[in-house]
Image: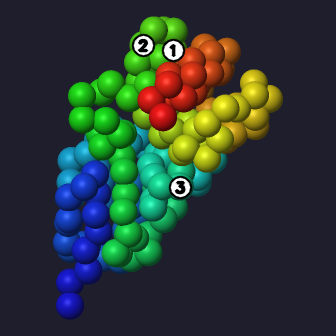
Amino acid sequence: MAQTVNINGKSYEIDVDGSMPLLWFLRDKLELTGTKFGCGMAVCGACTVHLDGQATRSCVIPVSVVAGKSITTIEGLSENHDHPLQKAWLKNKVPQCGYCQAGQIMNAASFLSQNPTPTPEEIDTAMQGNICRCGTYQRIKVAISEAALELGKEV
């Protein structure tokens, strides 16, 4: 019996070896290339997606583990790229090379769903596992704070 997974609201059949990392299933099989390969060891955060709402490093999760679960990638975070985090990222000129940004945003979105009114220290702690080679950490923190305020208005 074929196994399926829900990715960005659509059902997909898992038609690969179960040991394939979710990252490569997303990128190579589904052509969802917003999720990036960084280190391959779940250290840098570039490959972060949501697995049943939780920030998860897709480079080390075998596709066999995700059967029957719900996954959200950066492509599925918002239909028109207008999630408060995405808007705050642009407003604060966070991206430089941009490589880490999808993972940063996905980690921040999961964090804000659990802590909608974070302190600056809580933001620092939550984002520690996401590496930005360009060093835009202060802008990332400001963008997350602004997005938290915007998300609070939506409730």
Mark nearer the viewer, 2 or 1: 2
Q: Which class describes the residues within 10 Å of circle 3: few (<14), some (14-19), or many (20+)?
A: some
Q: Residue at x 34, y 75 (%)?
A: 68
Label 3 sits on a secondary structure element that is strand
Q: Position of residue 41 (x, y in %)?
A: 58, 54
In three-dimensional space, the C-alpha distance between marks 3 and 2, rounded to whole angstroms, equals: 24 Å
- Which of these two is toward me, 36 or 153? 153
Residue of label 3: 54
Residue of label 2: 90
Above or below for 129 versus 132: below
Residues under numbered marks 3 and 2 in contact, where contact means CB atoms less than 8 Å apart: no
Q: Which class describes the residues within 10 Å of circle 2: few (<14), some (14-19), or many (20+)?
A: few
Query: Can residue 100 be seen from the camera position used here?
Result: no
Query: Can residue 31 be seen from the camera position used here?
Result: yes
**Extreme-right residue of the structure:** 121
Q: Residue at x 43, y 34 (%)?
A: 102
Residues under numbered marks 3 and 1 in contact, where contact means CB atoms less than 8 Å apart: no
**Extreme-bottom residue of the structure:** 1
Tell whether 124 sits left or right of 80. right
Amino acid type indicated by mark 1: Val
Marking on residue 102: none
Q: Earlier in the sequence, mark 3 or mark 1?
A: 3
Q: Residue at x 36, y 51 (%)?
A: 72
Residues under numbered marks 2 and 1 in contact, where contact means CB atoms less than 8 Å apart: yes
- Which of these two is toward me, 118 or 62? 118
Q: Position of residue 25 (x, y in %)?
A: 30, 60
Q: Which class describes the residues within 10 Å of circle 1: few (<14), some (14-19), or many (20+)?
A: many
Label 1 sits on a secondary structure element that is loop
Q: Residue at x 45, y 61 (%)?
A: 52
Residue of label 1: 94
- Which of these two is toward me, 40 or 9? 9
Q: Earlier in the sequence, mark 3 or mark 2?
A: 3
